[in-house]
Image (tube, rainbow, N blue to C red):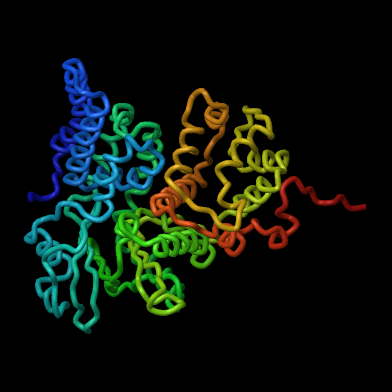
Amino acid sequence: MSDLPRKAVTRTAKLAALPLGFAGRATWGLGKRIVGESAEIVGRELQQRTAEQLFKVLGELKGGAMKFGQALSVFESALPEEVAGPYRAALTKLQEAAPPMPTRTVHAVLEERLGPDWRELFEEFEDKPAAAASIGQVHRAVWHDGREVAVKVQYPGAGEALVSDLGQLSRFARLLGPLIPGMDIKPLIAELKDRVSEELDYALEAQAQSVHAEEFADDPDVVVPAVVHQCEQVLVTEWIDGIPLSEIITDGTERQRDRAGQLLARFLFSGPARTGLLHADPHPGNFRLLPGGPDGEDDWRLGVLDFGTVDRLPGGLPTPIGVSLRLTLDGDAETVYELLCEEGFVKESIELDPDAVLDYLLPIIEPARVDSFQFTRTWMRSQAARIADPRSPAYQLGKRLNLPPSYLLIHRVTLSTIGVLCQLGATVRLREELEEWLPGFVEEDLPDEDLPGEEPAAEG
C-alpha cells in the first residue's frame, strides 16, 4: 500500500472516476438489457459494481473523500432497499476500516513528533493498525506506566488531502447524485469543509475529549477514554474494548440494539447539557458496546470515541428547539410558526401557512410523541420519500424553509443519529431523554421571559 495520495492531479482523477464510472456502467447495463437480460438482475449488478468502486476510491484516498463516505454511510437507511442493499456493505466498511498507511510512515511520524526515543514511551506498540479513519489511524499499545492505550497517528499530508477532496467533491456534487439517489449532497460537503481545521487539530480534540472524560468518569452508562498524551499529529488515549456498533447493527441481539439506541439518544441530548459540547461525528465506527452496565455484566455501556468534530454549545442545546418541539406536539401551529420565524427558519420575505408547517413537522417528530418508538429503515424511508418527492406538499414547503447557520451542525448530528437508530432498528424511549435533557421541552423548566411571543408588561 502506498502512502496517502497527495498530488491534486492524482486525487482529482480518482474522484472524477466515480461519476464517469457510473455513466459507463449505465451504458453497459443498457447494452445488457438490449440483449434480453432481466432489468432487475442488471440493476442489482450495476448497483453492486458502483458500490464496490465507491468504497475502493473513497477508502484508498482517505482524507475528505473517506470523510464524505462515512457521512453518507449513516444515511443509507433513508434510501430505497433496492438502492441501499448493495451500498450498505460498502459504506459500512468505511465506518470501521480503510487501507492502512505503511509502517515506515507511522514510525517516521512518531519519531518526528515524539522524538527519536519514542519507543521508550511504550512497553509495547503494535505496528498493525487497529482501525483506520479519514485523517489518521489507530494503533494499540501499552504506555510506559502499564496502561493500554490507543495511539492515533495523523496521515502526513492529511490537511491538504482533506481540503483538496472536499473541493473536488463540491465540483462533482451534481454528478454524484446518481450514486446516492434522493440525497442533497452539496450542503453536506459544504458543512464538512467548514470543519476541516478543527478536524486536523489534535489539541482541540484532546481538549474536547478530556472535558467529556472528566464529566462521564463515574457515569454508569457512558464511557469516554481519558487522554494520556497529545502532540501535533499524535493523540494517545486510554484503550477501551467493546463491540463496534457496526457489528451490533449487523449481528446484535434485540436487547443490544435497544440498549445501544437508548444510550446513543441519551448521549446525544445529555452531552451538550453536561459538557457544553455536542459530539458531532455520530457514525457507528465511533461507538462501542461494553459489558458491565448498571445491571451488571449482562448489561451494556456505550463507549464513545473520536472527538475531532464538536459543536460548542456553552448553554447546551438551544432552548427554542425544545420549545418548538413541545409546542408542535401540542398542535400550537401559530406559536410554532412565530418561533420558527424568530429563529430564522422562515426568512422575512417568505410567508407560509402555519397549519401547513405543522403538518410538515408532525410526522418527523413522531418518535417524541410516544413513550417508546421503534426506529426502522421503513420509517426513515417514508420520511425521506415524503420530503424528497417533488410532487408532495412537504417537498414544496421544505424548499421554502431555511436552516440558520447556528443550527446546521445540530441538524446534521440529529439526522445522523436518527439514521444510526434506524440502522439498529432500536426501540427507544426518546421522550424520556428529551424531558431529562432538552431545555424548553418541559414547560415548567422554561423561564417566563423565554416564552415565544411574550412581551414584557407595560408599567404604569
Dividing the picture into quadrants, the one containing residue 23 is: top left
Q: Position of residue 193 (x, y in %)?
A: 34, 43
Instruction: Identify the residue at horizontal 14%, vertical 72% (top origin).
Output: 125
Question: Furthest-bottom residue in view?
Answer: 145
Question: Furthest-top residue in view?
Answer: 34
In this figure, what is the number of numbered marks?
0
Left or right: 456 with respect to 236? right
* Image position of 380 with respect to 200: above or below: above
Dividing the picture into quadrants, the one containing residue 303 is: bottom left
For this rendering, which residue is in front, 4 or 394?
394
For this rendering, which residue is in front, 152 or 132?
132
Instruction: Identify the residue at horizontal 67%, vertical 59% (top origin).
Output: 442
* Image position of 67 with respect to 114: above or below: above
For this rendering, which residue is in front, 449 or 132?
132
Instruction: Identify the residue at horizontal 39%, vertical 67% (top origin).
Output: 302
Instruction: Identify the residue at horizontal 54%, vertical 32% (top origin).
Output: 398
For this rendering, which residue is in front, 393 or 192?
393
* Image position of 72 with respect to 132: above or below: above
* Image position of 85 with respect to 101: above or below: above
Q: Position of residue 37 (x, y in %)?
A: 19, 22
Q: Position of residue 445 (x, y in %)?
A: 69, 62
Left or right: 291 with respect to 29? right
Q: Position of residue 200 (x, y in %)?
A: 29, 54
